[in-house]
Image: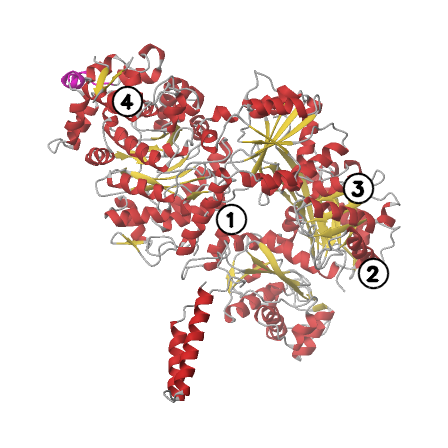
Amino acid sequence: MAVANNDLEKVIIQSVMEELAKKGLLSQKGKDHMMSAAMMDMPFVPNPQSEEMVTFPPQEEMQIDNPFNADAVRAMKKLTPARIGIGRAGTRPKTMSLLRFLADHAVAQDAVFLDVSDEFLQRMNLMAVQSSAGSKDEFLQRPELGRRLSEEAARKIAEKCEKNVQVQILIVDGLSSSAIEANIPDLLPALMQGLKSSGIKVGAPFFIKNGRVWVQDHVASIVNCDVVISLIGERPGLGTAESLSAYMIYRPDENTVEADRTVISNIHKGGIPPAEAGAHLTDVIKQILSAKASGVKLNQQK
Amino acid sequence: MPESNNQRITSVGIDIGTTTTQLVISQLTIENTASGSLVPHVEITDKEVIHRSQIYFTPLVDRDLVNAVAVSKILESEYIAAGLTPEMIDTGAVIITGETAKKENAKAIIDALAGFAGDFVVATAGANLEAIFAGKGSGAALYSAERHQVVVNIDVGGGTSNYATFHEGKAVDSSCLNIGGHLIEFERHGDRITYISEPAQTALETTGQRLQVGERVTLPQLRPVVKAMAECIVEVLKTSVHSNLTHKLLMTPPLQLAHPIRKVMISGGVADYVYAEKEPERMAEVTVFGDFGPLLGWELKVSLDSAGFVLEKPNETVRATVIGTGTQSVNLSGSTIHLQETTLPLRNIMVVSPFTAVIPETPEMIAEVIKSEMIQLQVAQTEGVVAIAMKGPRTMSFLDINSFAQGLLLGMQDYIVNAKPLILVMEADCGKVLGQCINASATHPLEVICIDQIEVDNCDYIDIGKPLMGGRVVPVVLKTLVFNR
Amino acid sequence: MILKAKVYNKIFAFQSLKEVMSKANEEKSGDELVGIAAKSASERVAAKLVLSNLTLEDIYNNPVIPYEEDEVTRAIYDGLNLRIYQEIKSWTVGYLREYILDHKTTGENLLHISRGLTSEMIAAVAKLMSTMDLVCGSKKIRVQSHCNTTLGIPGTLAFRCQPNHPTDSVEGMLASLKEGLAYGSGDAVIGINPVEDNVETVSRLLDTVKNFMVKWEIPTQNCVLAHVTTQMKAIEKGAPVDLVFQSIAGTQKANDAFGVSSAILDEAFALAQRKGSATGPNLMYFETGQGSEVSLDAHLGVDMMTLEARTYGFARGYRPFMTNNVSGFIGPETIYSGREVIRADLEDLFMGKLHGLPMGIAPCYTNHMKADQNDQEMGTLLCAMAGSNFFMGVPGGDDVMLSYQDTSYHDDASTREILGLRPLPEFEQWLEKMGILENGKLTERAGDPSIFDK
């Protein structure tokens, strides 16, 4: 709209000036003057097609003015992911530090509170079911709801999933939908390839919304598998919102405790990369299958 | 947990130099440092020197040829002194340095040491490697990391001066100059010249000095040529525009000097005289070991001082190289790798790095690059074992890793039909999944060794040892067999 | 004991003191989760009304968890000064609130009656107090303690420097420590949460920090926040421990889940006295938080705030050097929003102080709560005005090992300058000597960790 209005304005000014000039009421000099005045009034016109944009400076950039030993500060920044060497404005953080913090927190909150997209689930060809937590608020405030499937989910799994397989893979949003979208496309094919080429019988992986770790016990009771593995989003930190964990358990029952689960955490591009994690998890699952045990019981057998 | 979280290995380092031969035995502790739920991360957590040999004069058959049998005798007696047998040595390296680093020596030494040096002790040489080992052994590498300051270590031995520049613990530059304290030999405690080496002759000619074998010299007569040599050593630190003499004596490209240098550390046999309280006043003091090391040390200190460099004291002087060799030659692979244990150890694997720039996208194009590199290097695909080295696949996505696996199989087709293991060494952390993809894509069973998180820049050969920590990691020694001259 | 109240035209009847206590609480998700929160705003007020009319004796006679069944209850009752209790037992909770806020009542008076108050009495009165009431009450009370230096001196505000590292890297930890010191953080303690709870890691971190303190002559105390039994093993092996740390809770069942008991803490305190490296006499560092009993399923139907008060009752027998509250760390199932955290922090600060504890607060939040940095900063400023002895100091406010957000090094310096507060005296001298602080303000040089890399 702004562009159209301005164009119109220019046309009007120009035609008025031309009329004045025709009538000899305007010197050439005056014409220039009036034109430039009109130009100055024109606001800057944004160009939405431009590639220019504002971004954060690189994280490793040293932000301290006149440090005693700049190399030392740079080296220290390499030694820890902590926010150090970031300088200050008076006692407060610099503008970029403040905004980066806000951005990291925003990404973390979005990872927790937004859902895995339907488009993603379709692209990965994953059936989707839900825990008994109806909303994110309920999921966060009532942990027990995320540990059970909804009645509809239980029905759907009983109906559609293959029974008595060796391994059932679950993709569970947990506390980070972003972790799912970032890692599953590389982790899942690597894991499937590893298990299949080892001759292990695997059920079709599916997705559980608003789920917690324990929901795997409920699934295992329906599909009757040897090992159930949940690939679940970890609680985001400000450093990354994309970290994923794998929880595995051998034949869970009502006496199952936390220590019976084998856990591999910190799966993301800055930790163990997802494709490599898929290959590593294959080995771990093979160990669990041959030991017929997981968690502490597995470690004791090693 | 019954699966042990740490393991100790014994490593030997042997330094056979122009003048001296020495040995150290160290114990390396290897530990999984990752906490419970993390993927294992195995690293070397402790290095302890448990035995230092005497410092022997390198036994020679004649001036250029090392008496390899005598070297193996030294080894034998030192093992006894340390209470060890060759079977107890897990790893290590022999470094053949300075003037001794000639092909015929290397061959003879490797043959003579076989059986004495444990299962996985490898021979290495190369001035750059030597310089870096010396700087790690002297403490220069650690100094640069702890103080966050660039430091150059110069290991000044009998025949050569080896430079290594360290920045935040890493070697970033190195060079070698043919100057050392043993280039002119004298009667011990005397003043009669018994030998003048070629580089010393060059120095004499360039400085217009006339000294001859059999001649007796005074300290004032000797000083100018030694001073000139010391100044050559300092010149390499200062500028890349060199005097005629420095130019002639450089054995490798000079230091690039990308980092400003202020701090200097000296190790090697001459180092003790650099840090000496007072200068040698008589010829008898200069020739205490039958050479001019004490005078070179003093003159080097004077030159460094007047050029404005700050001298830092090393933790080790004469033993720096051997300690560096014994404790720093072994690298550990990443902790999620793919291998068949029976094949290992493998020695003298030729490294081929086909991918200089970007890695192509399709398996066919990847195969093309590998094939043309193998032809260019004239690697007859029927001979010897080869490792393909690279930074990693195009991206870390499963699709790219899988394409890469297919490309590798295709490119190495002729090689693997000879039932040789397919060996891959890369920097990126995806060894296990790449190995899995290769096996999944291969049409028939295949030996695949795929190790990651190893940088193989500027290295011609590698040795891969037996797996450690229940097969989680393998020790890797990077080396070069390209000897000086 | 009247358990019935009329709020305008509605009558509410309660079954027990326990029910009144829980329903009188401001809204928090943990009480909702357990199913003991007030069902309506009116019921909440009715509960407060009933509570205001109860006497301290009523509360004494009705502990929320019986004496015989719980060692926390026993610690509270056994440690009570009966003479003082007798003097005030006829006070109503409503009167106690007004007594606390009265101009004539001093901090000394409050610390005197403190000895005759059980934890439930203190919780009860806090339930009747608004945000500003809690600030007024807290501000009156100053509790000082001494380990190597003195914490809680009027006009000072101290900080724990918390240089955590995700893999316990000593070099990485030192980098964050240097940054913190360069902002003036670290006078309360240099305290590290280890990833690996074993003697080797704990000893390595303790040795490193102690050596750094000695090398740079830093007047403070060190601590590694592993499980108390790990620290005890480290002390036995000769590690330098100034402060012994432990997380504690308000029921015996929750403490069992933490792996602690009176017996273990007694032993730890005795060991710190015999083999610790500090001057003393205060040698313990406790952390507490509303909701820990809920998350451990060890709440026994008691509300989070009352359990938190009981935790302080358990702590006070050990004369800790510092007690830190981390209510915002527990999670959304106990405390959901920024508003809930700020309220909990102020309640806890007040309740801790009225127990005679040297209180500090970590006004913190996790990323799965509906809270952000603005809430965190409001909480910090309110608690600082209320006279918190100390806060945490985390690089950039982001703890890269525990994955939560807390007071930053910048906030530490800001809070001091906004409220005109100073570091602990010895530490201030050291900061001046290092050229970090001048007349209570950061110098040009401050904020540069490389001043330690000459």
Give the foreground label among 3 and 4: 4
Amino acid under label 4?
Glu
In the shown orientation, is residue A57 left or right of residue C142?
right
In this orientation, which residue lies closer to the viewer: C243 or B107?
Answer: C243
CA gap, disc 4 and disc 1: 54 Å
In the shown orientation, is residue C57 left or right of residue C261?
left
The range drawn in magenta is: C80-90
Q: Give the number of the disc on residue B376.
A: 2
Identify the element where label 4 is drawn: helix
In this orientation, which residue lies closer to the viewer: C172 or B356?
Answer: B356
Identify the element where label 3 is drawn: helix
Q: Residues within 10 Å of mark 1 (few under 14, many from 20)?
A: some
Magenta-colored segment: predominant secondary structure: helix
CA gap, disc 4 and disc 2: 87 Å
Q: Residue furthest left?
A: C104
**Residue bearing the label numbered 1:** A79
Give the foreground label among 1 and 3: 3
- State the image quarter where residue B433 is shown: top right
- Tag 3 near tag 4, CB within 8 Å: no
CA gap, disc 2 and disc 1: 42 Å
x, y percentage for residue B239?
A: 59, 72
Q: Which residue is at 77% across, 37% downward? A: B340
Amino acid under label 1?
Leu
Asked if both marks, 4 and 2, belong to the same chain, the answer given is: no
**Residue bearing the label numbered 4:** C43
